[in-house]
Image (cartoon, grey):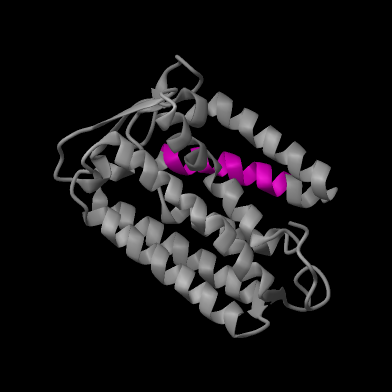
Amino acid sequence: MFLGHFAVGLAGKRVCPRTSLGTLTLAALFLDALWPLFLLLGLERAEITPSTNSFLLLDFTSYPLSHSLLMTLVWAVLFTALYFARTKYRAGAILCGGLVLSHWVLDYVTHLPDLPLWPGGPRVGLGLWNYPAAAVLVESLMFLGGVWVYTRVTRAKNRVGRMALWAYIVVLAALYAADATSPAPPNIRVVALTGIVGWFFVPWAFWIDHNREVGQGQGGRIGEVSRG
């Protein structure tokens, strides 16, 4: 899943308006932020496989550190603890941990049975990717819902707050469309480096949130400063 992870980050602003969209996005993407690093370090493995379904061009042969359920719980607890230690914002910390966990749940829906319950344990996955049209529809609806929630909770303080958000939306949608129709990548190193580019959306989300404000009745006074 791709757009779905961004969707839950955007929607998380409704639950904890004082938490920055950048932090919410990082939490929602956290497993995929770790995976390309582990791939480059040789700690995890993937293979390129021929397929007419672009969602199935990668075989995730081993990614227990980033994507097993057990390690996801560990990452969620660590993210929660670090966020709470920095901000003392309990609700935001709990939400961030939940967003880290949501990544595994959403991947469970879309992936083939390749997600280990624990390192070396049985693998699970419902396989929505076997049905590309349904996968695109589900993620697109989730993303539109996330954008709708975020724009209802916040409003632009300036032109940057408007333009940066809509550029973010358009770029993500374009990348998803390209990914859904792309040929096989040339090698796994390219896959990993492409994955690292995803980190760019985290500072972009911080920038968006810095130039927007929480509306009255959405967690406090207008213009309330995010806690990170």
Q: Position of residue 125 (x, y in %)?
A: 38, 33
- Residue at image location 78% in from the left, 58% down from the top: 227
Question: Magenta-highlighted stretch: main secondary structure?
Answer: helix
- Please tell me which residue lies in front, 137 or 226: 226
- Pick whichever, 222 or 200, lies toward us: 200
Queried whether the magenta region covers residue 104, the answer comes back as yes
Where is residue 97? Give x, y as percent. 67, 42
From what the image shows, is residue 60 above or below residue 160? Answer: above
The magenta segment is: 94-108
Residue at the (32%, 44%) spot, across then down: 128
> Which residue is located at x 25 percent, y 40 percent?
56
Is any part of residue 225 visible from this angle?
Answer: yes
Drawn side of residue 7 relative to residue 170, left or right: right
In the image, residue 157 sits, relative to residue 67, either above or below, namely below
Query: Is residue 98 rendered magenta in the image?
Result: yes
- Can you name the residue that lies furthest to the bottom here? 159
- Residue found at x 44% / y 45%: 196
> Is residue 82 rendered to the left or right of residue 195?
right
Image quadrant holding the C terminus, namely bottom right
Q: Position of residue 86 (x, y in %)?
A: 81, 46
